[in-house]
């Protein structure tokens, strides 16, 4: 128990240090220009904190809910739906700063409802069907996105950045308001999901065991599925589909702090936030041009995950 | 009038796109009874147990649990009556023993997943009863299969149920462990006034432990009575298609089946 507290202390100290670094570190070393810090770097840190945290949180929920440790938040087609939405938003040209996130959100929404309904049969949601439907819907939206990429005359890298995650979202008064409202909703969702931590422990033991322990399976799966999906959809709309965080962070958290969902959920959030802020720091300082975040998270995440895997074998 | 733990009336059940399994099955299980269910593979034992646990819904018929309609109870109410031990358990995440036993308190925790002092007390008591208290901080992956079974039993007891539904509780265990488990269950049954529904392939184990035995074959009721009247050469021969010899066990006078 004491050990856990020490670990938590380190985690939070590290997070504070990291936020400090992100605010004042740029391509040319440290800089303290007020406008850059407040208008450019602060939004990035906030966006990174919320999206990284939410993605890891959502991944943790879905892995337990679907009894599948290989689940990530995008397995249910949310990211592909969003990416296609972004493409459609591009068609509005000058208004795309507004329509891209909106359509991203709508795209995820459509994907979520399609997947849920495809896996719903005779009053029950089938977990395996949920994953399969997610993968299929994902492919479907990806093919539409590819079609768009081929036919649109826009430079491809703009789309690539949005699909692969990027924290350089341009805020104006209007988008900022939407961002604040959406994230307020996110926080409420995070709290509701947390209140189900005990049920999530039970659900990870399998549907029948969970039911025998008094979990109302259908009610829980519906609630948790929609809340986590919306959580992810909101983040993808603003920060793009940052990959790998939702898959590895929950495992890393379990590895350090144990498997109980009451600790896994909040600490996945913190660790996810840390990793995305670091990734963003690397993405915007390491190379002459800004790299997509997913490139960084995956490049550093994959070997690390393999290391964890080998250690546990 | 005796109180019935279970009254199963005229049960009809079939899996989707399959032949009907149960067509009008009726049985009664008395309170505090050790009730074993035996029958060949595919006879519907596990399905029956899942129906009794409320995990499957019959197409027709009623299941009455201590005078309540099983299917009008909420999930949590049901979990306070029934402890269900599944045939197989798997853990995708490496929980500690204590965390797993605590999950048995799910029907009692409040809406914000908060664990009370009483929950902790019950969990510790259940770990003592099943002799798992010394394992409480171990990870489930570090345990032997016998230890795992005791942990799951502790989790079920933490639900403070009135009935235990045990699906092949003693399979994959060595002989001494099997007897130890039977004795543990007998002690728990007395201490907590439990009704035990025990599903097994081991006829001799059913013989020494049961008050009554139900024999089913392909979903059909064959017989239900005290062990001496079920474990008879002709009945076993008919259902299992073997030629057994039945003797009287010299120590406990129960039927002893040799094949």
Image: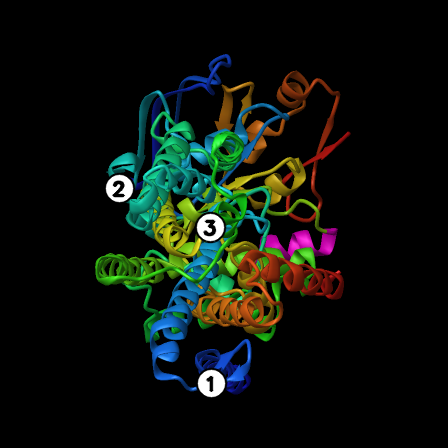
Q: Which residue is mark 2?
A: B73
Q: Give A256 or B101, whichever is nearer the viewer.
A: A256
Q: Mark 1 falls within which chain?
A: A
Residue found 58% across the figure and 48% down from its top: B89
The answer to whether mark 2 and mark 3 are in CB contact below 8 A is no
Helix, strand or loop at mark 2: loop
Query: Which tag, 3 or 1, sits closer to the chain's start?
Result: 1
Q: Which residues are magenta?
A: B174-184
The answer to whether mark 3 and mark 1 are in CB contact below 8 A is no
Question: Which labelled disc corresponds to residue A162?
Answer: 3
Report the Cα–Cα distance between label 2 and label 3.
Answer: 49 Å
Q: Mark 3 falls within which chain?
A: A
In this picture, residue A69 sits left or right of residue B258: left
Q: Give A62 or A157, whichever is nearer the viewer.
A: A157
Crowd rating for badge 1 (residues with CA inside 10 Å; few <14, some 14–19, many 20+): few
Q: Position of residue B23 (x, y in %)?
A: 42, 15
In the image, is residue A272 above or below residue A34? Answer: above
Q: Position of residue A143 (x, y in %)?
A: 52, 30
In this picture, residue A99 sits left or right of residue A79: left
Establish whether labels 2 and 1 are both on one chain. no
Crowd rating for badge 3 (residues with CA inside 10 Å; few <14, some 14–19, many 20+): many
Question: Which labelled disc corresponds to residue B114?
Answer: none
Picture quadrant of residue B106: bottom left
In this picture, residue A227 sits left or right of residue B223: left
């Amino acid at each position: 128990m004491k050990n856990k507290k020490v670990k938590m202390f380190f985690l939070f100290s590290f997070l504070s240090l990291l936020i400090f670094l992100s605010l004042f570190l740029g391509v040319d070393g440290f800089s303290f220009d007020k406008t850059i810090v407040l208008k450019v770097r602060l939004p990035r840190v906030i966006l990174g904190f919320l999206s990284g945290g939410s993605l890891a949180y959502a991944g943790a929920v879905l892995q337990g809910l679907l009894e599948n440790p290989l689940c990530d938040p995008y397995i249910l087609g949310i990211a592909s739906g969003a990416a296609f939405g972004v493409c459609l938003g591009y068609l509005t040209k000058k208004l795309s700063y507004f329509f891209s996130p909106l359509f991203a959100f709508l795209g995820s929404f459509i994907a979520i409802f399609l997947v849920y309904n495809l896996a719903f049969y005779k009053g029950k949601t089938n977990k395996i069907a949920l994953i399969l439907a997610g993968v299929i819907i994902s492919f479907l939206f990806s093919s539409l996105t590819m079609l768009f990429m081929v036919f649109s005359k826009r430079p491809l890298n703009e789309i690539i950045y949005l699909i692969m995650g990027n924290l350089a979202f341009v805020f104006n008064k209007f988008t900022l308001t939407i961002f604040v409202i959406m994230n307020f909703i996110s926080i409420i969702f995070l709290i509701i999901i947390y209140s189900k931590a005990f049920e999530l422990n039970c659900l990870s033991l399998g549907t029948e065991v969970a039911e025998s322990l008094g979990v109302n399976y259908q009610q829980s799966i519906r609630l948790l599925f929609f809340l986590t999906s919306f959580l992810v959809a909101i983040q993808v709309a603003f920060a793009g589909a940052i990959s790998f965080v939702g898959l590895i962070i929950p495992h890393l958290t379990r590895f350090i702090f144990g498997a109980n969902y009451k600790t896994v959920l909040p600490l996945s959030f913190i660790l996810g936030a840390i990793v995305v802020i670091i990734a963003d720091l690397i993405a915007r300082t390491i190379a002459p041009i800004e790299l997509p975040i997913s490139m960084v998270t995956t490049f550093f995440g994959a070997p690390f995950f393999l290391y964890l895997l080998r250690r546990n074998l | 009038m005796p109180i019935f733990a279970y009254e199963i009336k005229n049960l009809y059940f079939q899996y989707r796109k399959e032949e009907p399994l149960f067509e009008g099955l009726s049985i009664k299980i008395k309170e505090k009874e050790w009730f074993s269910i035996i029958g060949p593979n595919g006879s519907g034992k596990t399905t029956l147990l899942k129906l009794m646990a409320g995990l499957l819904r019959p197409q027709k018929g009623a299941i009455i649990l201590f005078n309540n309609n099983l299917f009008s109870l909420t999930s949590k109410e049901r979990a306070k009556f029934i402890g269900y031990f599944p045939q197989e358990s798997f853990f995708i995440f490496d929980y500690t023993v204590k965390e797993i036993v605590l999950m048995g308190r799910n029907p009692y925790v409040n809406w914000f997943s908060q664990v009370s002092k009483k929950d902790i007390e019950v969990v510790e008591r259940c770990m003592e009863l099943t002799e798992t208290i010394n394992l409480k901080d171990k990870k489930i992956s570090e345990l032997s299969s016998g230890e795992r079974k005791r942990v799951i039993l502790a989790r079920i007891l933490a639900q403070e149920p009135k009935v235990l539904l045990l699906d092949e509780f003693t399979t994959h265990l060595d002989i001494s462990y099997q007897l130890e488990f039977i004795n543990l269950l007998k002690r728990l049954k007395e201490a907590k006034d439990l009704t035990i529904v025990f599903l097994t392939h081991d006829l001799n184990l059913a013989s020494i432990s049961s008050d009554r035995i139900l024999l089913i074959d392909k979903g059909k009721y064959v017989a239900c009575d005290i062990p001496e009247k079920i474990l008879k050469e002709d009945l076993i021969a008919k259902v299992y298609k073997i030629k057994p010899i039945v003797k009287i066990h010299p120590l406990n006078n129960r039927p002893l089946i040799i094949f």
